[in-house]
Amino acid sequence: MTEPILLQIGNVTERMKNRFDALFDVHVWFDQQDQDAFVDTHGALVVGISTDGHWGVPDNLLARLPNLKVVSSYGVGYDAIDANDAAARGILVSHTPNVLNDEVADTAIMLWLATSRRLVQADKWARSGQWERDGAFPLTRSVQNRQIGILGMGRIGETIAKRASGFDATIHYHSRTPKDVNYIYHSTVKELADAVDVLFVITPGGASTYHLVNDEVMNALGAEGMLINVARGSVVDETALIAALQDVFAVTIGAFHEALGLGDLQPDARMAQCAFAAVTGDFRRFNDFGFRCFKRHSSNPSNVGRCNAYGRSNGVGQEGNIDPIRPANFNLMSL
């Protein structure tokens, strides 16, 4: 008797593979050199599909598997599966809610901490030996007592809120309807973004949330806001995100030019990083590290001269004369 076929789309763990192999004749979708030919030959024998939230099920495949009984998605999201079409064909669609609540929430908090404290940049600073040339890594901003926004107060959203509360955060949220939670509800995403320092995005994907975080939301979040997206990439308007980052970038460089009288300077990307490290929250004063960094990477001798003149008159950029002013609260270099 021919074994029923399980069609595997995407990767599985070794444990899952062993269980599948014991019960089914497993065929891996992406191993098929001619997928159409595989379906024509074996489609009637496929009784199950194992997939995940990323790969889902290819368009029109359900219609070509007449004896398919179940599509099991390894993960929470199933927006890449046409669940309505499956239901119309009597095919059960399952997913794994609650299994990864803690793991996704931990990842979200990890991203927040790493971005706020610039952990990746600090690690590079230490490993490269930059601390020997420029001293201690610039101060970063605290994560305590922040206004935290959660877009999508579902199972994972509640778990993120619980963890963020441990940092004495005030929790705000937006969802389709108010929840029975002791957090501050906002009726629109823009209103939520306007009220918080950090916005966690943890909504389902799909058409209903496509570009939910748009330019209006990012403008409300502001130049010092932080966006942590652990939902589908489609929830954030990527074009608007890039434009928002470029706007912050331009404002920072412009302030740097103005304070130094470098209005005609066209900095390259490395010099722009120096400006971010140098400019403080009021856009008018510079810390010692960023100043020396800017001078070192400027290819224009006249710019270096003007930097030196500014440094002598303002007490920065000189060895042995450190002005430990906090760096700017911008996130471009953290994303």
Image (cartoon, rainbow, N blue to C red):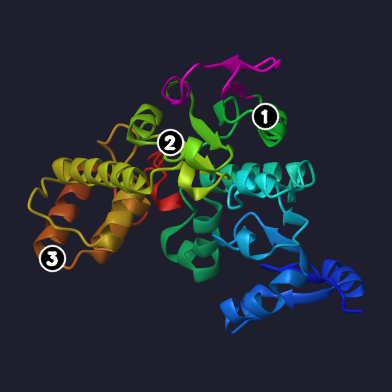
Which residue is under mark 1?
161
Q: In this picture, is 221 found above or below 111?
A: above
Name the residue carrying label 2: 213
Tell me the element at label 3.
loop
Crowding near pointer 2: few (<14 within 10 Å), some, many (20+)? many
Vertical relation: 331 (above or below) 184: below
Residue 9: numbered disc: none
Q: Gap in Å between the C-alphas at discs 2 and 3?
A: 40 Å
Mark 3 nearby-residue class (10 Å; few <14, some 14–19, many ≥20) = few
Residue 156 appears at what percent x and percent y?
69, 36
> Given this view, does label 3 or label 1 mark the residue nearer the observer?
1
Lower sequence index among marks 2 and 3: 2
Which amino acid type is shown beneath numbered disc 1? Ala
Camera-side residue: 206 or 45?
Answer: 45
Q: Residue at x 75, y 67 (%)?
A: 12
Alpha-carbon span between mark 3 and mark 1: 49 Å
Residue depth check, mark 2 versus mark 3: number of the one nearer the observer: 2
Looking at this view, is 168 or 186 the one in front?
186
Q: Position of residue 330 (x, y in %)?
A: 39, 41
Of all residues, the one furthest to the bottom in this rendering is 33
Q: Which residue is painted at 25% across and 36% down in the image?
A: 284
Please identify the quadrant where the N terminus is shown: bottom right
Report the magenta residues as a range: 169-193
Q: Secondary structure at mark 1?
A: helix
At label 2, which amino acid type do we have?
Answer: Val
Q: Report the residue marked by disc 3.
A: 300
Residue at 36% across / 31% down in the picture?
Answer: 222
CA distance for labels 2 and 1: 19 Å
- Above/below status of 143 relative to 60: above
Residue 262 locus on image (x, y percent): 11, 50
Residue 245 in sight from this viewpoint:
yes
Disc 2 secondary structure class: loop
